Image (cartoon, rainbow, N blue to C red):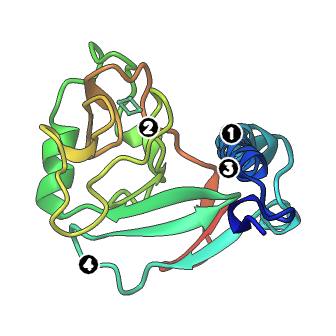
Amino acid sequence: MDSSHSPSHPPYDREKSRRDFLVLTAAAMGAVAAGSAVWPLVDQMNPAADTLALATTEVDVGTLQDGQTLTAIWRGKPVFIHRRSPADLAAIRGEEWQSLRDPQSDEARVQKGHDAFLVLIGVCTHLGCIPMGSKVGQPKGDYNGFFCPCHGSHYDASGRIRKGPAPKNMDVPPYSFLSETLIRIG
Ligand code: FES
């Protein structure tokens, strides 16, 4: 009997199986790629129940030192809470703001009596990357604030756009001080 033509594994079937495998592999990879592209859209349209439930977030800033930033999450977005030193605050207050791209005074972006604390949604207003500058050692950009590495937007220590493609200042979420050290966002 000729073993090279075994009825269970004829040469033709082996080649066909190999082609089927390649086609299936390509289809699977295509499905993965399509899944990755579609997910962010689906995710945006259907915020998770726990995200919706977090309409407010309370943050204790009692241990935050001058120059430090902590990141909270509010409605699924990062919120930077940055404590400015007296020197940094004096510097930002001394700058002319009327001719900035998105003119806004520092006073209008913080709460009176808690001027050292800057509270910002940590999302670049260009295309939505998370700017750097909230962690020790990260670049703060040319204006001692935050730097978006995606396309090079520089924000100052008030979160105002100073250089790069971003059209607007970083957003300030609604927030209030429940005590000297407790902030409620939302
Ligand atoms: S997303 Fe920040 S500069 Fe483009």
Q: Is residue 159 above or below residue 71?
A: above
Report how far apart the C-alphas of labels 2 and 3 lie in the structure.
48 Å
Instruction: Tell me the mark number nearer the camera, choosing from 3 and 1.
Output: 3
Rendered residue at 53%/58% (across/down): 78
Q: What's the amino acid at mark 2?
A: Cys
Rendered residue at 36%/56% (across/down): 115
Rendered residue at 44%/59% (across/down): 80
* Residue with the mark numbered 3: 18
Q: Quadrant of the N terminus?
A: bottom right
Q: Quadrant of residue 135?
A: bottom left
Report how far apart the C-alphas of labels 3 and 1 lie in the structure.
18 Å
Report how far apart the C-alphas of labels 1 and 2 lie in the structure.
31 Å
Q: Earlier in the sequence, mark 4 or mark 1?
A: 1
Task: Name the secondary structure under disc 1.
Answer: helix
Task: Name the secondary structure under disc 3.
Answer: helix
Q: Earlier in the sequence, mark 3 or mark 1?
A: 3
153 or 70, which is in the foreground?
A: 153
